[in-house]
Image: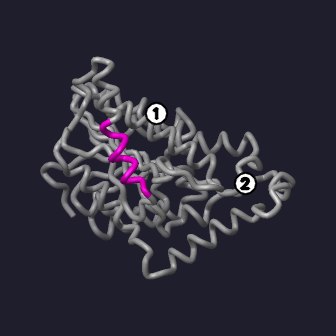
């Protein structure tokens, strides 16, 4: 498909599987220039990279697959510099890369919970620091943070996953306020449970001795996984395509008119929480004399 006259240059992280891969194809098929990034595109993810490249060639899509590791500043800077050199700009950043650790929270080692935060929180922060100077110089841009309803409500067995998503929610919302006046939107997409590879690829706790110490709930990882696997196999399971469609819709909306939060799928009360906290946060801004940051 030929690029649209109003085509955006879109950088997506974590495009090897799941929402990232689907979003890359959905957005490219709608006439945008897409950089579907992933780490180790010449090694572990070589198959995923070649698959995307093949589809792009067959369909005539403006889709490129750069190598990008969200945990490495050098990798991020190299990818961003390449994209800006080739396209002249980055209009949209989709912070999608992430993984979900499941199990008894105490039983995850320091190395494990640091990795959870490195990918799910510090990764998006690094990407924003790399991309925002380009967006601010043009006074235009959009950052879509793919978080989770687990950044608004809590699930046992997901302690560090929830913590990483709560942190990203806070960071993204503060950017939403601080970027007022620059023509840049920082918004969130909050998926509920969807049948992607996120659950199948989830790491478990390394300290099995501590897992066993939790007695009757020591099998909480298996309980959690089985419950959602049954849900994903049922007629009630939502279509994962809803997430890339929501991202595409945000890209195509006018700047300044995009909602701060978009919830997709079963929300477990996240929509209610969002509706209750929004006016409270607006009152906080007014109390601080920052009325200009209160967006409709």
Instruction: Assess whether residue 3 is covered by the magenta stretch.
Output: no
Q: Is residue 133 visible?
A: no
Residue 41 visible: yes
- Viewer-closest of 144 and 103: 103
Residue name at image x 35 percent, y 30 percent: 132
Which residue occupies 50% across, 42% down?
166
Horizontal and vertical percent position of residue 241? 36, 67
Query: In the figure, 72 relative to 230: above or below?
Result: above
Residue 104, disc: 2
Q: Which residues are magenta?
A: 269-279
Q: Main secondary structure of the magenta part?
A: helix
The residue that disc 1 covers is: 77
Q: Earlier in the sequence, mark 1 or mark 2?
A: 1
In the rendered image, the quadrant that contains the N terminus is bottom left
The number of discs equals 2
Q: How is the image coloured?
A: one colour
Q: Nearer the viewer, residue 83 or 208?
A: 208
- The answer to whether 196 appears left or right of 290 in the picture is right
């Amino acid at each position: 498909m030929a690029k649209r006259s109003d085509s955006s240059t879109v950088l997506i992280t974590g495009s090897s599987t799941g929402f990232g891969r689907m979003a890359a194809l959905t957005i490219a098929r709608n006439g945008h220039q897409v950089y579907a990034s992933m780490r180790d595109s010449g090694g572990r993810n070589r198959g995923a990279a070649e698959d995307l490249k093949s589809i792009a060639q067959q369909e005539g899509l403006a889709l490129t697959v750069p190598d990008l590791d969200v945990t490495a500043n050098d990798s991020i800077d190299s990818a961003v510099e390449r994209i800006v050199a080739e396209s002249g700009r980055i209009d949209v950043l989709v912070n999608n890369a992430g993984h979900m650790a499941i199990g008894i929270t105490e039983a995850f080692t320091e190395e494990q919970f640091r990795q959870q935060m490195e990918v799910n929180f510090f990764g998006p922060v690094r990407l924003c620091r790399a991309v925002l100077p380009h967006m601010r110089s043009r006074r235009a841009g959009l950052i879509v943070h793919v978080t989770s309803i687990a950044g608004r409500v809590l699930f046992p067995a997901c302690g560090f996953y929830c913590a990483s998503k709560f942190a990203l929610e806070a960071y993204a919302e503060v950017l939403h306020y601080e970027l007022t006046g620059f023509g840049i939107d920082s918004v969130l997409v909050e998926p509920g449970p969807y049948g992607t590879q996120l659950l199948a690829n989830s790491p478990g706790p390394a300290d099995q001795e501590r897992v066993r110490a939790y007695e009757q709930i020591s099998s909480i990882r298996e309980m959690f996984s089985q419950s959602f696997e049954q849900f994903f196999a049922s007629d009630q399971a939502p279509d994962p395509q809803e997430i890339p469609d929501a991202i595409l819709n945000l890209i195509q909306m006018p700047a300044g008119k995009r909602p701060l939060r978009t919830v997709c799928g079963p929300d477990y009360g996240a929509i209610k929480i969002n509706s209750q906290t929004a006016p409270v946060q607006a009152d906080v801004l007014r109390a601080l004399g920052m009325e200009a940051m209160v967006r409709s």
